[in-house]
Image: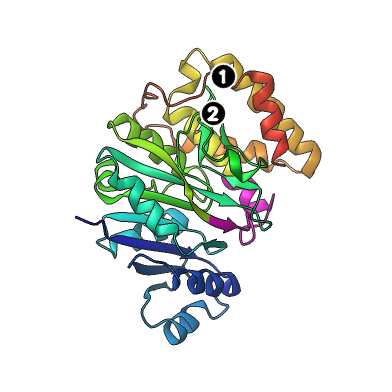
Amino acid sequence: MSLSVDVVITTHQGWEFTKRCLEHLREQTVAHTVIVSDSASTDGTPKNTRTLYPHVKLLAHAVDPGYAAATNLGVAAGIGDVILLLNNDAFCRPDFLEHLVAAFASDERIGAVAPLTVRSDERTIDSVGLTLDVTLAPFIRLTGKPSEEAASPRPLLVSPGGGADAYRRSAWIEAGGLDERFPLYGADIDLALRLRSRGWTTVAAPDAVAVHLRSATSGHRSPRARQSGGWARGFLLRRWGVLRSRAVVRAVVAELLVAMADVALSRDTVAVRSRISGWRAAGGLPRLRVPPGAVDPEIGFVESLRLRWAVR
């Protein structure tokens, strides 16, 4: 039996990107349902979507509920077996969904799939999902490498993440979807750990290709992006008990170095304050245990610092 597909696009401004994204989806070789969950855009996104793309299911939120909540609402509005969370600045090749569905169909225990996103030159890898070091610091897999290396098994694939993240609906429901406490970043990592804890696996689909203009809508190193990233670090460190693990010293030293570097570079204390805020938000919540095989032990301390700095 073929798997049905819902494409969920969570938007906040950026209509020109959304329009281009929707045009590419029209060319897909696999039937699918498109759901746009718009978070109070004022640039005409809801009106233009209704007028130009009447086949799209639109959820227009008068007040921005936050990325995770808007995405969960978009997912809940569909019934597809496969859920693709697609950034509006990601543009899929015509056979993208075809390869994505094939990956899920290959094994019923696959709960998530990370496709290949490439940069605008369409030859350089933007992402093939995410990997984590022992402190749960996330790194984009294979970024900057030639697209011919997209099938590489290293570093370890832990989570989708790169503008086009796919999930099996039954796995999504079992794990509870995105944690709506996350302001923007980090919810995908938290979900990936919960999926793995329940026995679901994540695989790559290097033949499913989309062009991704990373940070085109959120803004690279914007105050919002930096605040969200810092909050997620503080929350994940406490929620998943990293500071009670053998990685405690490495985690503390790494966060101090990264936070101080951010203070020097940005001339503000967003990195420090957001981490404290995230840590406090996880207070009172039950500690979760990082599942076996969820981190890449080959990413050493020095390498992790290099990878963090490389994306700045």
Q: Nearer the viewer, residue 32 or 288?
A: 32
Question: How far separated are the C-alphas under marks 1 and 2?
Answer: 9 Å
Q: Amino acid at mark 1?
A: Glu
Q: Is residue 169 above or below residue 284?
A: below
Q: Is residue 13 above or below residue 180?
A: below
Q: Does the magenta portion include 145?
A: no
Residue 221 place in picture, x, y as percent: 69, 49
**Which residue in the protein does label 2 denote?**
154
Label 2: which secondary element = loop
Q: Quadrant of the N terminus?
A: bottom left
Who comes first in sequence, dot 1 or dot 2?
2
Q: Residue furthest bottom?
A: 51
Q: Which residues are magenta?
A: 210-228
Q: Does residue 176 show up?
A: no
Q: Does residue 15 show up?
A: yes
Label 1: which secondary element = loop
Q: Quadrant of residue 142?
A: top right
Report whether 82 appears left or right of 259. left
Q: Residues within 10 Å of mark 2 (few under 14, many from 20)?
A: few
Residue 150 place in picture, x, y as percent: 55, 41
- Which of pointers 1 and 2 indicates the residue nearer the eye? 2
x 68%, y 52%: residue: 220
x 69%, y 20%: residue: 302
x 45%, y 71%: residue: 27
Q: Quadrant of residue 261?
A: top right
x 66%, y 57%: residue: 219
**Which residue in the protein does label 1 denote?**
298
Residue 211 place in picture, x, y as percent: 58, 58
Q: Amino acid at mark 2?
A: Arg
Q: Residues within 10 Å of mark 1 (few under 14, many from 20)?
A: few
